């Protein structure tokens, strides 16, 4: 299987449904299992790190009018531009994030604190290494945490029975700024969401830290390198 399938997706798999939105994986057969999300807010529907598929617009219409598209990682331009143009909205990124503006053919809006006016998001920056830029979003009204890259639920994220795991490299510098959060669900950029006891899963992942790096490197080192190289494409 390829790490990332760059072909046009037909019908995405809906991997999570909530009162306030849904999550989907457009290419369920790829090893990277890139996930996207839609969340309803007081602003309207926010679409996060989208990969397009033929059934997504109908699902978005069921939620309401799209207010904006947010890209949460400098490697997640994905189909943000196409979806933003179709819904006549901007693509929102943090003021400090590189790469995306050159890769998105749509209006860009940069924010300082969080995307949206009344969306209810709280943004937490994560820049653990040179060239690694992502932003975690916490949606206060629904207690939803979105983690685009550092934390995921794919096989190459998790070791020792983890339900949520750090990318191999990030085990050296885990995002401790997430400590203390008790989300009702965790939506990830790679893999299916964590909806059962997400707070303990987050705590376990953060506690693993540097001591888990040798095991993760042994189990997932080659796949992690392949994923990072593929993300540059």
Image (cartoon, grey):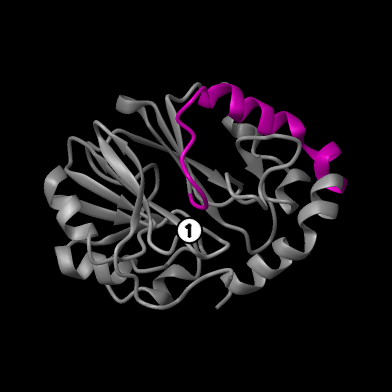
Residue bearing mark 1: 34
Question: As rendered, which of 31 and 224 lies closer to the eye?
Answer: 31
Is residue 162 a member of the stretch shown in magenta?
no
Image location of residue 168, percent across then percent down: 74, 51
Question: Which quadrant is home to the N terminus?
Answer: bottom right
- Direction from residue 117 to residue 174 in the image, left or right: right
Residue in the image at 24% along x and 54% along y? 68
Q: Which of the 4 image quadrants contains residue 87? A: bottom left
Q: From the viewer's perspective, is 99 left or right of 126?
A: left
Q: Residue at x 65, y 41 (%)?
A: 165
Determine whether 87 is above or below 117 in the image: below
Q: How far across and down, in percent of the image, does residue 93 sit?
A: 39, 57
Q: Main secondary structure of the magenta part?
A: helix
Decide if residue 179 is in sight here. no
* Drawn side of residue 60 relative to residue 25, left or right: left
Q: Residue at x 31, y 66 (%)?
A: 52
- Residue 209 part of the magenta segment: yes
Vertical order, 138 against 44 (above or below): above
Q: Which residues are magenta?
A: 189-214
Q: For this rendering, which residue is in front, 178 or 217?
A: 217
Query: Quadrant of the image for the C terminus?
Result: bottom right
């Amino acid at each position: 299987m390829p790490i990332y399938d760059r072909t046009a997706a037909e019908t995405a798999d809906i991997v999570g449904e909530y009162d306030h939105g849904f999550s989907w994986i457009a290419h369920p057969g790829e090893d990277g299992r890139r996930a996207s999300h839609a969340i309803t807010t007081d602003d309207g529907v926010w679409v996060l790190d989208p990969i397009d598929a033929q059934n997504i617009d109908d699902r978005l219409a069921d939620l309401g009018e799209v207010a904006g598209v947010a890209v949460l990682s400098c490697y997640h331009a994905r189909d943000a531009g196409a979806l933003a143009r179709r819904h006549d909205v901007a693509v929102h990124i943090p003021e400090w994030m590189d790469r995306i503006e050159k890769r998105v053919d749509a209006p860009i809006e940069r924010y300082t604190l969080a995307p949206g006016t009344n969306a209810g998001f709280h943004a937490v920056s994560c820049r653990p290494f040179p060239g690694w830029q992502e932003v975690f979003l916490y949606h206060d009204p629904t207690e939803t945490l979105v983690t685009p890259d550092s934390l995921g639920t794919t096989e190459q994220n998790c070791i020792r029975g983890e339900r949520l795991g750090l990318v191999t490299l990030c085990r050296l510098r885990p995002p401790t700024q997430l400590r203390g959060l008790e989300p009702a669900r965790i939506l990830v950029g790679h893999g299916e969401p964590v909806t059962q006891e997400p707070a303990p899963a987050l705590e376990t992942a953060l506690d693993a830290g540097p001591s888990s790096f040798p095991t993760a490197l042994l189990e997932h080192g080659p796949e992690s390198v392949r994923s990072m190289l593929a993300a540059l494409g």
